[in-house]
Image: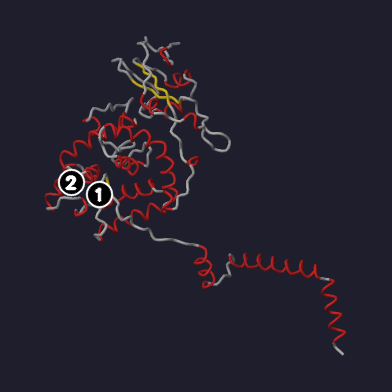
Amino acid sequence: MLKPYFNKILQFIIASKKYFIVFGCALVLLSIIKLFNYSFSNNLIDATYEDYFNANYKTFSIRIPKNINFAGEKVPVNDFSVREAMERELVINTYWQSQSLLLHKRANRWFTVIEPILKKNNIPEDFKYIALIESQLTNVVSPRDATGFWQIMECTGTSYGMEINTEVDERYHVIKSTETACKYFKDAYKIFNNWTLVAASYNFGMGGLKGQLDRQKVNNYYDLLLNEETARYVYRILAMKEIIGRPKVYGYMLRKKDLYPAIPVKRITVDSSIHNLADFAISQKINYKILKLFNPWLRTNTLTNTEKKKYSIEIPKNGVEIYDNDGNYDGSNNLTASDSIKLITIPPIEKDTILLESGSTK
């Protein structure tokens, strides 16, 4: 009796197959939308919310490298106090993504300037990370008036021959401040004969660190009990060496185009006063902002030079529009070693004559 009815139902289903498929897809879509809205509604119970969080958010512990070293000097990571201090800085800087991402970008630009100077002075390359942790490779001023990439105090700068006054402050000059830092490192190495202690002394001071070594009767940084800032100092350097040096290991998937390129510059030597740096900038086909960005050591709008001292002023070699519309950098303009150290020397000038490249005057 029921067989004819089942046959009619089956025939109806077959005839309406496409409508069932559409209806089924609609139901699935509505379910997904409902689930999405529900998942983020205020009525979501705690247990469901926690399940969603655990399924979608992952945080991993950081593996401590086995053979980490500073300037070739091994870090004793089998010591629990050392290992856990190292881990602290690696975790903080790995998961402080916004800061570490910017440091990757800046390092690509500024390490090309710093590395040759360290090499010339026989300072281990790892010391470049001191500038990175001191200032984040920016010309900042600390509450104690330590200034520039290397955070040099005025008394330290002047003792090493830097010019520091109201118009000129060479602590803001990346090349000259790096040279000054190298002088400090050399002097400190004569005392400690250990690069790790030299690095720690840059934060604590030579005398203070020597006193702590004598007082605590130890001979290395990792056995010292120090104030928190200096106790973390070398580990912060090591953490940034790891993260910047091996970005993919720590989750930073950066393309070359994502990093800030070194900007080629030409250098103009002046040996007289410049009464208005804004006018000088315009004469060089740039503006005052760009002039100050490339020469932050010029602290006012004038350069009074009654003693006819020679100053080297940098301007961008190929202008400021170095990216295309997609953010790609024209690699043909890469900074070369000769560009980074070459000075364009010009004949002496009178009064405020504007200086141009290759010795011509206007």
Question: Percent position (x, y) of residue 273?
Answer: 36, 16
> How dense is the environment of label 1, judged by Cα within 10 Å: few (below 14), some, or many (20 and up)?
many
What label does residue 270 carry, if any?
Answer: none
Q: Is 23 displayed left or right of 299 in the figure? A: right
Q: Position of residue 269 (x, y in %)?
A: 36, 18
Question: What residue is disc 2 on?
Answer: 209
Extreme-top residue of the structure: 350
| Marker count (numbered) | 2
Indicate the position of residue 283 as horizontal and vertical percent values. 47, 18
Tell me which label, 2 or 1, sits earlier in the chain: 2
Q: What residue type is labelled 2?
A: Leu
- For the residues labelled 2 and 1, the Cα–Cα distance comes to 10 Å
Q: Name the secondary structure under disc 1.
A: helix
- The residue that label 1 is drawn on is 230
Camera-nearest residue between 68 and 100: 68
| Percent x, y of residue 218 | 14, 52
Do the CB atoms of the residues marked 2 and 1 lie less than 8 Å apart? yes
Frontmost residue, 167 versus 249: 249
